[in-house]
Image (cartoon, helix red, strand yellow):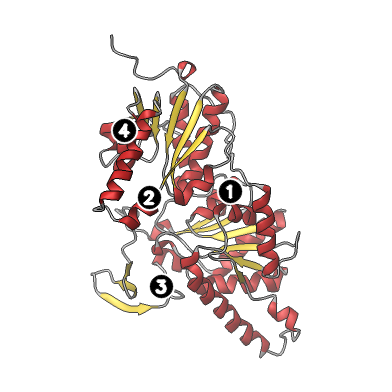
Amino acid sequence: MRPPALPDLRAVHRLLIIRLSSIGDVVHAIPLSAALGEAFPHLEITWLVEEMSADIVTGNPYLKEVIVVPRGRWKQGRLRSPRVWREYLAFLADLRRRRFEVSLDIQGHSKSGLMALATGAPYRLGWWRLRDGAQFASRPLPRRPESVHRVDWFLDVARALGAEPTAVRFPLAIPEASRAQAAELLRSVGIAPSAPYAVLNPATGDHNRRWGARPYAELAVALAERHGLPSVLIGSGKDRTLCAEIIALARERQGARVTSPNAPHSDAQAGALIPVSLAGQTDLKQLAAVLEGCTIQVCGDTGSAHIAAALGRPVVATFGPTDPAHAGPWGQLDRVLARRDLCFPDCPGRCRSIERRSGGTQAIGAQGEPIPRLSSAEAITPCLRTITPGEVLARVEQVLYES
Protein backbone atom coordinates (compact mmCIF):
# COMPACT_ATOMS: atom_id res chain seq x y z
CA MET A 1 0.00 0.00 0.00
CA ARG A 2 1.38 3.43 -0.97
CA PRO A 3 1.85 5.98 1.87
CA PRO A 4 -0.40 9.05 1.81
CA ALA A 5 0.77 11.98 -0.29
CA LEU A 6 1.26 14.21 2.76
CA PRO A 7 2.30 13.27 6.28
CA ASP A 8 0.06 13.62 9.29
CA LEU A 9 2.27 15.86 11.45
CA ARG A 10 0.38 14.72 14.54
CA ALA A 11 2.18 11.39 14.08
CA VAL A 12 5.57 12.87 13.13
CA HIS A 13 8.35 13.52 15.65
CA ARG A 14 11.42 14.72 13.71
CA LEU A 15 11.11 17.38 11.03
CA LEU A 16 13.90 19.22 9.22
CA ILE A 17 13.61 22.71 7.72
CA ILE A 18 16.23 23.43 5.05
CA ARG A 19 16.72 27.15 4.45
CA LEU A 20 20.43 27.81 4.07
CA SER A 21 20.64 31.48 3.02
CA SER A 22 20.33 34.43 2.39
CA ILE A 23 19.86 36.42 5.59
CA GLY A 24 16.65 38.09 4.39
CA ASP A 25 15.08 34.86 3.18
CA VAL A 26 16.00 33.09 6.40
CA VAL A 27 14.22 35.87 8.30
CA HIS A 28 11.21 35.49 6.00
CA ALA A 29 11.13 31.75 6.73
CA ILE A 30 11.22 32.06 10.53
CA PRO A 31 7.40 32.32 10.83
CA LEU A 32 7.19 28.83 9.31
CA SER A 33 8.90 27.40 12.40
CA ALA A 34 6.51 29.29 14.67
CA ALA A 35 3.47 28.15 12.71
CA LEU A 36 4.51 24.50 12.83
CA GLY A 37 5.66 24.67 16.45
CA GLU A 38 2.39 26.21 17.65
CA ALA A 39 0.18 23.86 15.64
CA PHE A 40 2.19 20.74 16.55
CA PRO A 41 3.99 21.42 19.85
CA HIS A 42 5.27 17.83 20.06
CA LEU A 43 7.35 18.26 16.88
CA GLU A 44 11.13 18.20 17.21
CA ILE A 45 12.07 20.77 14.57
CA THR A 46 15.64 21.09 13.33
CA TRP A 47 16.84 23.87 11.02
CA LEU A 48 19.65 23.40 8.49
CA VAL A 49 21.36 26.73 7.74
CA GLU A 50 24.66 28.07 6.44
CA GLU A 51 26.99 29.79 8.87
CA MET A 52 26.44 33.30 7.45
CA SER A 53 22.76 33.18 8.50
CA ALA A 54 22.96 30.86 11.51
CA ASP A 55 22.54 33.61 14.13
CA ILE A 56 19.11 34.38 12.70
CA VAL A 57 17.70 31.04 13.88
CA THR A 58 19.83 30.22 16.94
CA GLY A 59 17.82 30.69 20.12
CA ASN A 60 14.51 30.17 18.30
CA PRO A 61 12.25 28.59 20.96
CA TYR A 62 10.43 26.49 18.34
CA LEU A 63 13.61 24.69 17.28
CA LYS A 64 15.11 21.68 19.01
CA GLU A 65 18.40 22.05 17.13
CA VAL A 66 20.20 24.15 14.53
CA ILE A 67 22.62 22.38 12.19
CA VAL A 68 25.15 24.77 10.66
CA VAL A 69 26.55 24.00 7.21
CA PRO A 70 30.22 25.14 7.22
CA ARG A 71 30.07 26.39 3.63
CA GLY A 72 32.74 29.04 4.20
CA ARG A 73 35.26 26.45 5.36
CA TRP A 74 34.39 24.16 2.48
CA LYS A 75 34.86 26.98 -0.03
CA GLN A 76 38.23 27.89 1.46
CA GLY A 77 39.31 24.26 1.16
CA ARG A 78 38.20 24.18 -2.49
CA LEU A 79 35.92 21.56 -3.97
CA ARG A 80 38.79 19.45 -5.33
CA SER A 81 40.22 18.91 -1.87
CA PRO A 82 39.85 15.30 -0.65
CA ARG A 83 39.48 16.64 2.89
CA VAL A 84 36.51 18.81 1.89
CA TRP A 85 34.83 15.92 0.08
CA ARG A 86 35.33 13.61 3.07
CA GLU A 87 33.86 16.21 5.39
CA TYR A 88 30.93 16.88 3.04
CA LEU A 89 30.09 13.19 2.67
CA ALA A 90 30.35 12.70 6.43
CA PHE A 91 27.98 15.64 6.87
CA LEU A 92 25.41 14.05 4.54
CA ALA A 93 25.79 10.71 6.31
CA ASP A 94 25.11 12.42 9.64
CA LEU A 95 21.89 13.88 8.24
CA ARG A 96 20.73 10.37 7.34
CA ARG A 97 21.59 9.00 10.79
CA ARG A 98 19.25 11.53 12.38
CA ARG A 99 16.29 9.72 10.80
CA PHE A 100 14.14 12.73 9.97
CA GLU A 101 10.62 11.74 9.04
CA VAL A 102 9.89 14.93 7.07
CA SER A 103 12.22 17.35 5.32
CA LEU A 104 11.02 20.75 4.10
CA ASP A 105 13.26 22.23 1.39
CA ILE A 106 12.42 25.93 1.32
CA GLN A 107 15.72 26.84 -0.33
CA GLY A 108 14.81 25.07 -3.55
CA HIS A 109 18.21 24.75 -5.24
CA SER A 110 20.46 21.83 -6.10
CA LYS A 111 22.51 22.08 -2.90
CA SER A 112 19.43 21.96 -0.67
CA GLY A 113 17.95 19.22 -2.86
CA LEU A 114 21.01 17.05 -2.26
CA MET A 115 20.71 17.57 1.47
CA ALA A 116 17.01 16.73 1.43
CA LEU A 117 17.78 13.57 -0.53
CA ALA A 118 20.57 12.67 1.91
CA THR A 119 18.17 12.70 4.86
CA GLY A 120 16.35 9.66 3.48
CA ALA A 121 13.17 11.13 4.96
CA PRO A 122 10.03 9.26 3.85
CA TYR A 123 8.41 12.63 3.13
CA ARG A 124 10.60 15.12 1.28
CA LEU A 125 8.59 18.26 0.60
CA GLY A 126 9.35 21.86 -0.30
CA TRP A 127 7.93 25.23 -1.18
CA TRP A 128 6.51 25.90 -4.62
CA ARG A 129 9.78 27.27 -6.10
CA LEU A 130 11.82 24.08 -6.26
CA ARG A 131 14.25 24.29 -9.18
CA ASP A 132 17.78 23.43 -10.34
CA GLY A 133 17.10 19.75 -9.66
CA ALA A 134 15.57 20.23 -6.20
CA GLN A 135 12.18 19.31 -7.66
CA PHE A 136 13.47 15.78 -8.28
CA ALA A 137 14.46 15.31 -4.63
CA SER A 138 11.36 16.83 -3.01
CA ARG A 139 7.72 17.38 -3.81
CA PRO A 140 6.71 21.05 -4.18
CA LEU A 141 3.72 22.16 -2.11
CA PRO A 142 1.31 24.62 -3.71
CA ARG A 143 1.03 28.27 -2.83
CA ARG A 144 -2.29 29.99 -2.47
CA PRO A 145 -3.29 32.45 -5.22
CA GLU A 146 -3.55 35.24 -2.64
CA SER A 147 -0.02 34.67 -1.33
CA VAL A 148 2.32 37.27 -2.81
CA HIS A 149 5.07 37.88 -0.26
CA ARG A 150 7.78 35.35 0.52
CA VAL A 151 6.64 35.17 4.14
CA ASP A 152 3.27 33.90 2.94
CA TRP A 153 4.92 31.58 0.41
CA PHE A 154 6.82 29.92 3.26
CA LEU A 155 3.73 29.87 5.48
CA ASP A 156 1.84 28.13 2.68
CA VAL A 157 4.08 25.13 3.39
CA ALA A 158 2.75 25.07 6.96
CA ARG A 159 -0.80 25.56 5.72
CA ALA A 160 -0.49 22.64 3.30
CA LEU A 161 0.55 20.47 6.26
CA GLY A 162 -2.42 21.36 8.43
CA ALA A 163 -1.20 24.43 10.34
CA GLU A 164 -3.38 27.54 10.23
CA PRO A 165 -1.36 30.42 11.72
CA THR A 166 -3.56 33.15 13.15
CA ALA A 167 -0.63 35.59 13.32
CA VAL A 168 2.78 35.95 11.71
CA ARG A 169 5.45 35.55 14.39
CA PHE A 170 9.18 36.15 14.03
CA PRO A 171 10.91 34.35 16.93
CA LEU A 172 14.23 36.19 16.47
CA ALA A 173 16.15 35.76 19.73
CA ILE A 174 18.59 38.43 20.95
CA PRO A 175 20.63 37.47 24.04
CA GLU A 176 21.11 40.10 26.74
CA ALA A 177 24.87 39.80 26.23
CA SER A 178 24.43 40.87 22.60
CA ARG A 179 22.32 43.84 23.69
CA ALA A 180 25.02 44.90 26.15
CA GLN A 181 27.73 44.53 23.48
CA ALA A 182 25.67 46.56 21.01
CA ALA A 183 25.17 49.31 23.59
CA GLU A 184 28.91 49.44 24.20
CA LEU A 185 29.61 49.65 20.45
CA LEU A 186 27.13 52.52 20.12
CA ARG A 187 28.68 54.27 23.10
CA SER A 188 32.12 53.91 21.50
CA VAL A 189 30.97 55.93 18.46
CA GLY A 190 29.25 58.61 20.51
CA ILE A 191 25.65 57.33 20.77
CA ALA A 192 24.59 57.63 24.40
CA PRO A 193 22.35 54.98 26.02
CA SER A 194 18.66 55.61 25.28
CA ALA A 195 19.53 58.34 22.76
CA PRO A 196 17.59 58.20 19.48
CA TYR A 197 19.51 57.31 16.33
CA ALA A 198 18.89 56.26 12.74
CA VAL A 199 20.54 53.24 11.17
CA LEU A 200 21.63 53.57 7.54
CA ASN A 201 22.70 50.46 5.65
CA PRO A 202 24.17 51.41 2.25
CA ALA A 203 25.39 47.86 1.53
CA THR A 204 23.60 45.12 -0.38
CA GLY A 205 24.64 41.67 -1.52
CA ASP A 206 24.34 42.68 -5.18
CA HIS A 207 25.90 45.95 -6.27
CA ASN A 208 22.95 46.71 -8.55
CA ARG A 209 20.70 47.06 -5.49
CA ARG A 210 22.71 49.93 -4.00
CA TRP A 211 21.37 53.45 -3.77
CA GLY A 212 24.86 54.98 -3.74
CA ALA A 213 27.11 56.72 -1.23
CA ARG A 214 26.16 60.31 -2.03
CA PRO A 215 22.41 59.98 -1.31
CA TYR A 216 23.16 58.38 2.05
CA ALA A 217 25.56 61.18 2.94
CA GLU A 218 22.95 63.81 2.05
CA LEU A 219 20.30 61.96 4.01
CA ALA A 220 22.50 61.61 7.10
CA VAL A 221 23.22 65.35 7.15
CA ALA A 222 19.55 66.18 6.62
CA LEU A 223 18.44 63.90 9.47
CA ALA A 224 20.90 65.59 11.82
CA GLU A 225 20.10 69.12 10.65
CA ARG A 226 16.33 68.84 10.65
CA HIS A 227 15.71 66.33 13.42
CA GLY A 228 18.89 66.16 15.51
CA LEU A 229 19.01 62.46 14.65
CA PRO A 230 22.52 60.99 14.36
CA SER A 231 23.08 58.23 11.81
CA VAL A 232 24.86 54.92 12.39
CA LEU A 233 26.19 53.19 9.27
CA ILE A 234 26.22 49.40 9.27
CA GLY A 235 27.53 46.67 7.00
CA SER A 236 30.06 43.87 6.89
CA GLY A 237 33.83 44.25 6.93
CA LYS A 238 33.95 44.55 3.15
CA ASP A 239 31.60 47.56 3.38
CA ARG A 240 33.98 49.68 5.47
CA THR A 241 35.26 51.49 2.36
CA LEU A 242 31.72 52.36 1.25
CA CYS A 243 30.86 53.66 4.72
CA ALA A 244 34.09 55.68 4.83
CA GLU A 245 33.11 57.23 1.50
CA ILE A 246 29.75 58.26 2.92
CA ILE A 247 31.43 59.83 5.95
CA ALA A 248 33.85 61.72 3.68
CA LEU A 249 30.96 63.01 1.53
CA ALA A 250 29.07 64.09 4.66
CA ARG A 251 32.17 65.98 5.82
CA GLU A 252 32.38 67.60 2.39
CA ARG A 253 28.78 68.70 2.71
CA GLN A 254 29.43 69.95 6.23
CA GLY A 255 32.33 71.99 4.90
CA ALA A 256 30.02 73.68 2.40
CA ARG A 257 27.59 74.48 5.21
CA VAL A 258 30.25 75.94 7.47
CA THR A 259 31.23 78.47 4.78
CA SER A 260 27.66 79.69 4.42
CA PRO A 261 26.54 82.75 6.45
CA ASN A 262 23.81 80.85 8.34
CA ALA A 263 25.92 77.80 9.22
CA PRO A 264 26.36 76.80 12.90
CA HIS A 265 29.83 77.43 14.24
CA SER A 266 29.73 75.04 17.18
CA ASP A 267 32.07 72.07 16.76
CA ALA A 268 29.49 69.89 18.54
CA GLN A 269 26.77 70.98 16.11
CA ALA A 270 28.98 70.40 13.11
CA GLY A 271 30.18 67.03 14.37
CA ALA A 272 26.63 65.83 14.88
CA LEU A 273 26.07 66.04 11.12
CA ILE A 274 28.65 63.36 10.42
CA PRO A 275 27.46 59.72 10.45
CA VAL A 276 29.43 57.12 12.38
CA SER A 277 30.22 53.60 11.24
CA LEU A 278 29.90 50.18 12.85
CA ALA A 279 30.58 48.34 9.58
CA GLY A 280 32.39 45.07 10.24
CA GLN A 281 32.11 45.44 14.03
CA THR A 282 28.96 43.42 14.76
CA ASP A 283 27.83 39.84 14.43
CA LEU A 284 24.19 39.23 13.47
CA LYS A 285 22.96 39.10 17.06
CA GLN A 286 24.66 42.41 17.89
CA LEU A 287 23.38 43.91 14.65
CA ALA A 288 19.86 42.85 15.59
CA ALA A 289 20.31 44.59 18.95
CA VAL A 290 21.48 47.78 17.21
CA LEU A 291 18.42 47.64 14.95
CA GLU A 292 16.13 46.84 17.87
CA GLY A 293 17.07 50.15 19.50
CA CYS A 294 16.98 52.42 16.46
CA THR A 295 14.39 55.08 15.72
CA ILE A 296 14.31 54.13 12.05
CA GLN A 297 16.38 52.25 9.49
CA VAL A 298 16.99 53.36 5.92
CA CYS A 299 18.47 50.76 3.60
CA GLY A 300 18.19 48.96 0.29
CA ASP A 301 17.12 45.43 -0.52
CA THR A 302 19.27 43.79 2.13
CA GLY A 303 19.07 41.52 5.15
CA SER A 304 18.98 44.24 7.80
CA ALA A 305 15.68 45.51 6.35
CA HIS A 306 14.05 42.19 7.18
CA ILE A 307 15.67 41.89 10.61
CA ALA A 308 14.40 45.34 11.59
CA ALA A 309 10.92 44.61 10.23
CA ALA A 310 10.85 41.31 12.14
CA LEU A 311 11.70 43.27 15.29
CA GLY A 312 8.90 45.75 14.64
CA ARG A 313 11.20 48.68 13.87
CA PRO A 314 10.27 51.11 11.08
CA VAL A 315 12.10 50.66 7.78
CA VAL A 316 12.29 52.96 4.77
CA ALA A 317 13.82 51.05 1.88
CA THR A 318 14.92 51.78 -1.68
CA PHE A 319 14.36 48.86 -4.05
CA GLY A 320 15.84 48.43 -7.51
CA PRO A 321 15.48 45.29 -9.62
CA THR A 322 13.77 43.25 -6.88
CA ASP A 323 9.99 43.41 -6.62
CA PRO A 324 9.16 44.62 -3.08
CA ALA A 325 5.73 42.97 -3.29
CA HIS A 326 7.55 39.64 -3.03
CA ALA A 327 10.59 40.54 -0.95
CA GLY A 328 10.04 43.88 0.77
CA PRO A 329 10.20 44.37 4.55
CA TRP A 330 7.23 42.47 5.96
CA GLY A 331 4.30 44.67 6.92
CA GLN A 332 5.96 47.86 5.68
CA LEU A 333 5.62 47.78 1.90
CA ASP A 334 4.09 51.28 1.97
CA ARG A 335 7.50 52.56 3.10
CA VAL A 336 9.38 51.12 0.13
CA LEU A 337 10.44 53.45 -2.69
CA ALA A 338 10.84 51.73 -6.06
CA ARG A 339 10.75 52.62 -9.73
CA ARG A 340 9.45 49.41 -11.22
CA ASP A 341 8.24 51.32 -14.30
CA LEU A 342 11.88 51.85 -15.31
CA CYS A 343 12.72 48.14 -15.31
CA PHE A 344 12.97 46.11 -18.50
CA PRO A 345 9.67 44.33 -19.24
CA ASP A 346 11.45 40.98 -19.35
CA CYS A 347 13.83 41.76 -16.49
CA PRO A 348 14.86 38.48 -14.82
CA GLY A 349 15.73 40.24 -11.58
CA ARG A 350 19.32 41.14 -12.49
CA CYS A 351 19.81 44.70 -13.70
CA ARG A 352 21.66 44.95 -17.01
CA SER A 353 22.81 48.53 -16.57
CA ILE A 354 25.72 47.93 -14.19
CA GLU A 355 28.06 44.96 -13.92
CA ARG A 356 30.60 44.23 -11.22
CA ARG A 357 34.02 43.52 -12.65
CA SER A 358 37.46 43.13 -11.13
CA GLY A 359 39.11 46.51 -10.81
CA GLY A 360 35.96 48.56 -10.32
CA THR A 361 32.38 49.14 -11.37
CA GLN A 362 31.69 49.06 -15.09
CA ALA A 363 28.55 50.67 -16.47
CA ILE A 364 27.12 49.06 -19.60
CA GLY A 365 25.01 51.02 -22.08
CA ALA A 366 21.80 49.87 -23.77
CA GLN A 367 23.75 48.45 -26.72
CA GLY A 368 26.36 46.78 -24.51
CA GLU A 369 28.90 49.58 -24.89
CA PRO A 370 31.12 50.34 -21.84
CA ILE A 371 30.55 53.63 -20.05
CA PRO A 372 33.47 55.24 -18.11
CA ARG A 373 34.02 53.75 -14.67
CA LEU A 374 32.35 55.48 -11.74
CA SER A 375 33.04 55.61 -8.04
CA SER A 376 30.63 53.83 -5.71
CA ALA A 377 29.21 57.30 -4.95
CA GLU A 378 28.00 57.65 -8.53
CA ALA A 379 27.48 54.06 -9.81
CA ILE A 380 23.73 53.72 -9.38
CA THR A 381 21.32 51.75 -11.52
CA PRO A 382 18.74 53.87 -13.39
CA CYS A 383 15.73 52.76 -11.33
CA LEU A 384 17.52 53.72 -8.10
CA ARG A 385 19.14 56.87 -9.48
CA THR A 386 15.72 58.52 -9.79
CA ILE A 387 14.98 58.07 -6.07
CA THR A 388 16.17 61.29 -4.42
CA PRO A 389 17.33 61.91 -0.84
CA GLY A 390 14.41 64.35 -0.54
CA GLU A 391 11.91 61.60 -1.32
CA VAL A 392 13.48 59.26 1.20
CA LEU A 393 13.65 62.02 3.81
CA ALA A 394 9.96 62.78 3.28
CA ARG A 395 9.09 59.11 3.84
CA VAL A 396 11.28 59.04 6.96
CA GLU A 397 9.59 62.16 8.28
CA GLN A 398 6.18 60.54 7.83
CA VAL A 399 7.35 57.78 10.16
CA LEU A 400 8.85 60.23 12.66
CA TYR A 401 5.66 62.28 12.77
CA GLU A 402 3.56 59.15 13.26
CA SER A 403 5.58 58.05 16.28
Indicate the quadrant containing the N terminus: top left, top right, bottom left or bottom right: top left
Q: Is residue 6 visible?
A: yes
The answer, for residue 147, to whether it is visible in the render is no
State the residue at coordinates (35%, 30%): 96
User: How far apart are labels 3 and 1 at the CA level?
Assistant: 28 Å
Q: Name the amino acid type tagged 4.
A: Ala
Label 3 close to label 4 by CB (< 8 Å) = no
Question: Along the polypeptide, which appears first: circle 2 or circle 4?
Answer: 2
Name which of mark 3 and mark 1 comes first in the sequence. 1
Image quadrant in which you'd find residue 62: top right
**Mark whose residue sits in front, 1 or 2:** 2
Judged left or right of residue 329, residue 365 is left
Q: Earlier in the sequence, mark 3 or mark 4?
A: 4
The numbered mark at residue 118 is 4
Q: Which residue is mark 2?
A: 71
- List x then y, in percent, for residue 377: 46, 75
On screen, residue 273 above or below 338: below
Q: Disc 4 on helix, strand or loop?
A: helix
How far separated are the C-alphas under marks 1 and 2? Answer: 27 Å
Residues under labels 2 and 4: Cα distance?
Answer: 17 Å
Circles 2, 3 touching at the beta carbon (< 8 Å): no
Task: Give the residue number, with chain letter if any, for mark 3.
Answer: 379
Q: Give the residue type at disc 1.
A: Ala
